[in-house]
Image (spheres, rainbow, N blue to C red):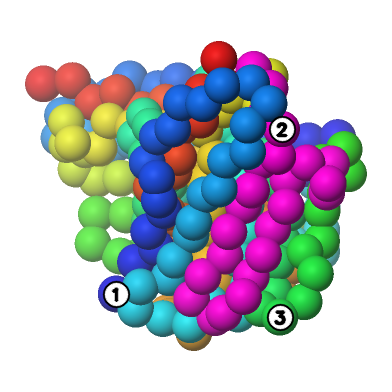
Amino acid sequence: GAVVSQHPSWVICKSGTSVKIECRSLDFQATTMFWYRQFPKQSLMLMATSNEGSKATYEQGVEKDKFLINHASLTLSTLTVTSAHPEDSSFYICSARGLAGATDTQYFGPGTRLTVL
Amino acid sequence: DQQVKQNSPSLSVQEGRISILNCDYTNSMFDYFLWYKKYPAEGPTFLISISSIKDKNEDGRFTVFLNKSAKHLSLHIVPSQPGDSAVYFCAASEIGDKLIFGTGTRLQVFP
């Protein structure tokens, strides 16, 4: 149980285009989903927290207009990187927290590698 | 301000021996702690957790110890196996709040 999927697993796009990443909790309802990014050899950096049906809460320094988060249902959250630039290239990981197992355990997706040319 | 610290960036252990990964935190309000294992280009995998009301939690080869007075937790893996080679992150939170991750420790288990 407690499986979280992400799609796509990798994406290459041109500078200026927008990219949407999906995060799904497959076998549990995720009351809260989180989006992280990870630069090489660095820790996970929390970008935003989203609760189903409400606006996401962004961490300091994260541009909400650039990283659009939608948590439309208890099993799906999307992150859209708008007008992507090479500096947005990173590994994006979502996690979900819900009713599976311990209530405060986050289960992570496999990540999405974004490369912006 | 790094609230969760893993001071050892890497650790090398022989197969069959014990691996001990350490983590320190500064926020006394943290009351839930977790360990995750991560392979390159994959998302973290949950290993084990402990709440502040306990000082030890065991699951198979993995045991987490919590010393609240020292604000220190550790993960023990015994016996270590080559498949345990990965980056291990500790994380902490106040219940219901976001996780704060450490910077990770790369564990290498050699034959």
Q: Splitting the image into 4 quarters, where does residue A44 fall?
A: top right
| Mark 1 and mark 3: Cα distance apart in space | 24 Å
Residue denoted by label 2 = A83
Residue picked out by circle 1: A1
Read off the residue under disc 3.
Answer: A53
Magenta region, residue range: A63-86
Circles 1 and 3: CB distance less than 8 Å? no
Of callouts 1 and 2, which one flags the residue occurring earlier in the amino acid sequence? 1
Amino acid residing under circle 3: Gly
Whole-angstrom CA distance, mark 3 to mark 2, is 25 Å
Residue kind at label 2, given as amino acid type: Ser
Residue A52 position within the rendered picture, expressed as x and y whole percent measured from the top left: 66, 78
Badge 3 marks a residue whose secondary structure is: loop
Q: Residues within 10 Å of mark 3 (few under 14, many from 20)?
A: few
Q: Spatial distance from mark 1 to mark 2, Cα to Cα?
A: 36 Å
Q: Amino acid at mark 1?
A: Gly
Q: Is residue B5 left or right of residue B2?
A: left
Residue drawn at x 24%, y 45% is: B78
Q: Looking at the figure, which quarter contains the N terminus of chain A?
A: bottom left
